[in-house]
Image (cartoon, rainbow, N blue to C red):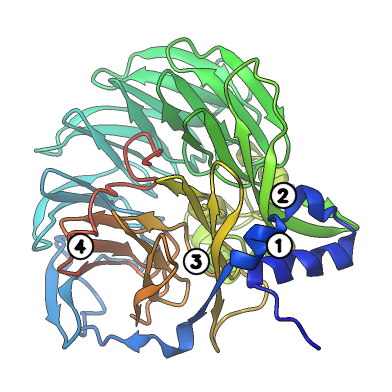
Amino acid sequence: MRIKLPLACAALFAAAITTGINLREHSPTAQAASQCKEVELRLDRALAVGLPSLPSHPSLTGQAKAVPFKTPKLEGWIVKFGGSRPIATPAYADGMIFVGGGYGSHEFFALDALTGRQVWKVNTSDDGPTAAVVEGGFVAFNTESCTVYVVEERTGKIAWQEWLGDPLMSQPAIAKGRLYMAYPGGQRGHGQSGHKLLCADLKTGKHLWEQPITADVITAPVIEGEQVFLSCFDGTSFCLNAFTGKVIWKKTSSATSAPTISNGQMIVTRKQQKDTVDFEGIEIADCRPGIANQPKMVALAPAPYFKAGAGTLLPTASQVNLDAAVGFAGGAPPAAGMSEAAGNVGVSTVAGGWAYQGSRAQIHEGQIINAQGDLLNCYSASSGKVAWQARAKGSKMKAESQVFAPPALGKQNLYLLSADGHVVSINQKTGNVNFMYSLNQPMAFQPALALGNIYIGTNNGMLICLKTGDTDADGWTAWGGNAQHNKK
């Protein structure tokens, strides 16, 4: 007699047989296992959506021009930026979308969120705008090389800018009139080398404090209340006082994504290794200082993408070419600290670090959801029990790669983008698929959700707006959901 185990349970039993990992520490309870719902995501059966033909060479004036489209199933608009470069997660505020022209570009745009019409454009002094955050009437972003910018939301007028160091691979965060940004120290003729986290006044750029950290930050700092949380590329996690920069605690344990903070808990993915085999799972731990706790580890599964260097959704060859185009043909500079990143998450290029988001977990109404390898996991934050799990399948998928960017959460549904161009909507509670489209455009970053629309950056220089007609697609206004990167 053969027993068919749910995906979560089957994966864990296979892991245990291979590595000898203690299932009592990492698996759901027997009751949870019996209730585990299995969902199959057949990406090769996604509905193909034909997008309009776009000019191969956008206007030399540098104006972003939106092209509307309408199919029997979908409508929206597309803007094609010059250079066919990867576009990071756009940000939404006050009827506008804010987006950079891609890794290697020198442009940053504000577009009308409903039509795609260009509102304003900023030409940057150096290249590679990151995803932006918006708060208090200001838009903040940085370039990979090597400057942080704060501009007025309505006009695009530069409030202040500062050259920090080369390269800058993470995004800024904003909270309570302060901007938080990681940078490599020692390049401005003063101070010690090594990475630092900077806190500056949002309106003026005045430095309020700096704190040494162990490496560049994975994706972005995360703000919750009066604390700043971050994971570094070398696997170290920090909790800092947001007003003084004082280290509250520091933990070295192979973190592989930016954390999410909710109800005194820190949810973060971590790597474990057993007999040279890499595993990744979600750690749920009390993050309050002085609280003794035994962290729970869930969703532990083999993670071959770390050794393959495929934990980011940018193909390795594209990463190398993108780096060469911005002056890193000989490899990442020592200031980037990519040797630590390569050892922890398998990323060794600046473009790869710029695009890396890992298996970052989100939380909504007590459920932890993340995309990890070819799996989509949903667990209870309080008990660690599995609610449902989905496995992606499809003819184009590569065996040792991360399939999806981290999900964006609507009110009831989650929204996923794949490296092969799939857009998937799934009910958060049940795991049931609402729709699954194939746009046939490569994607690496999490989408933004606003006004019933899904805003998607592609790896080949496009911003796509999909109008779902459903108010569920709303409220996820930047990478991580808000300017603090900690939407719950």
Which element carries disc 2, helix, strand or loop?
strand
Q: Amino acid at mark 4?
A: Asn
Among numbered discs 3 and 1, the one appearing first in the sequence: 1
Relative depth, front residue between 153 and 423: 423
Identify whether 171 is placed above or below 355: above
Q: Which mark is residue 404?
A: 3
Q: Find out whether the residues at labels 1 and 2 contact each other: C-beta distance under 8 Å.
A: yes
Identify whether 59 is placed above or below 179: below
Quarter of the image containing the C terminus?
A: top left
Q: Which residue is painted at 42% across and 27% down in the image?
A: 224
Q: How many other residues sit within 10 Å of disc 4, few (<14), some (14-19) or many (≥20)?
A: many
Among numbered discs 4 and 3, the one appearing first in the sequence: 3
Identify whether 251 is placed above or below 17: above
Whole-percent x, y for residue 455 in the image: 26, 61
Among numbered discs 1 and 2, the one appearing first in the sequence: 2
Q: Which mark is residue 271?
A: 2
